[in-house]
Image (cartoon, grey):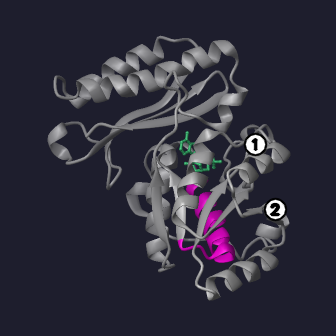
Amino acid sequence: MIEFNNSEHLNEWCRNKRKKGLSIGFVPTMGALHEGHLSLIRIAKANNDIVTSSIFVNPTQFNEKEDYDKYPISLEKDKDLLFHEGCDVVFTPSVQAIYPTSSEYNLDIDMGEMANVMEGKHRPGHFNGVMQVVKRLLEIVIPNVLYLGKKDYQQYSILKKMVRYYEMGIEVEQCPIVREHNGLAMSSRNRRLTDQESKAALLLSKSLFKIRDSWQQESAQDLIEENLAVLNSDQLIDVEYLEIIDSESLIKIDNWSETKSAIVCVAAKVGKIRLIDNVTIY
Ligand code: AMP
């Protein structure tokens, strides 16, 4: 596995490979890698000549300083894990390497309502930061396919739209959510949960599965109300949103008749740790 931290060097390396007709699959991450990340690497590996991953905790997508400051870092272990999955290239840039000038990479794209709901509403500026860093990374790595986890469903939808908007000619592949045996969606932030908080966090995926399993018996609104009450009754959980959305527009629905494909999404603080998860209903 080759490690790059210089953007120009990596770009030149990737250009050479593309000129030779080799395909590049790209998996951007913020590190603190777990099985969820590694599943993306495996999917990329099975479908491309070369797999490139990046480890970069992007400051511009954090709207809370403490969340950024305390974001878990385990660079050496991450590189080891990537190496064992057969990842070909890891990009570990500094903030300066990604944003050499501060203004040049500011994006001003209107993603419409899709970017104003859920994460967009609760984390102002978050998606601008995500688009900014992913656009920059895509310009450096020039991959054929970008692999993203369904865990961040809104992020996937927005980045797919961004790639189309800029006509980047990159395929965007959605990869399934990897969960712990108990149902908790894997997340780098899970490392920061205490034992008690980990137990409480289980309620999130439980509620999502309960909603999925009962949708034919109950209205969307009733299911949301009932499950919100369950989540809110746990003292460690502070729900930011629990919404059933249309999988294309991401707009909240109140009645099943409003959509052909529904996803239930949740964001909640468990203790001080903010977690998100989602489950496709139909
Ligand atoms: P992050 O390091 O959190 O920015 O995540 C990097 C990529 O891994 C994103 O595309 C995430 O959606 C994806 N990812 C994170 N957790 C999981 C998971 N549990 N299952 C599948 N993909 C995931």
Q: Which mark is residue 120?
A: none
Q: Between residue 112 and residue 161, name the one nearer to us.
A: 161
Placement of 118 over or under 156, stated as above or below: above
Q: Quadrant of residue 14?
A: bottom right
Q: Secondary structure at mark 2?
A: helix
Mark 2, other Cα within 10 Å: few <14 / some 14–19 / many ≥20: few
Can you identify the residue that label 1 sits on?
A: 65
Left or right of 258 on screen, residue 125: right
Q: Quadrant of residue 107?
A: bottom right
- Give the distance between the C-alpha atoms of the residues marked 1 and 2, in whole angstroms: 16 Å
Can you identify the residue that label 2 sits on?
A: 95
Magenta extent: 124-144
Placement of 52 over or under 82, stated as above or below: below
Q: Quadrant of the C terminus?
A: top left
Chain-order first, disc 1 or disc 2? 1
- Regarding residue 49, the answer to whether it shows in the image is yes
Q: Secondary structure at mark 1?
A: helix
Q: Between residue 216 and residue 176, name the one nearer to us.
A: 176
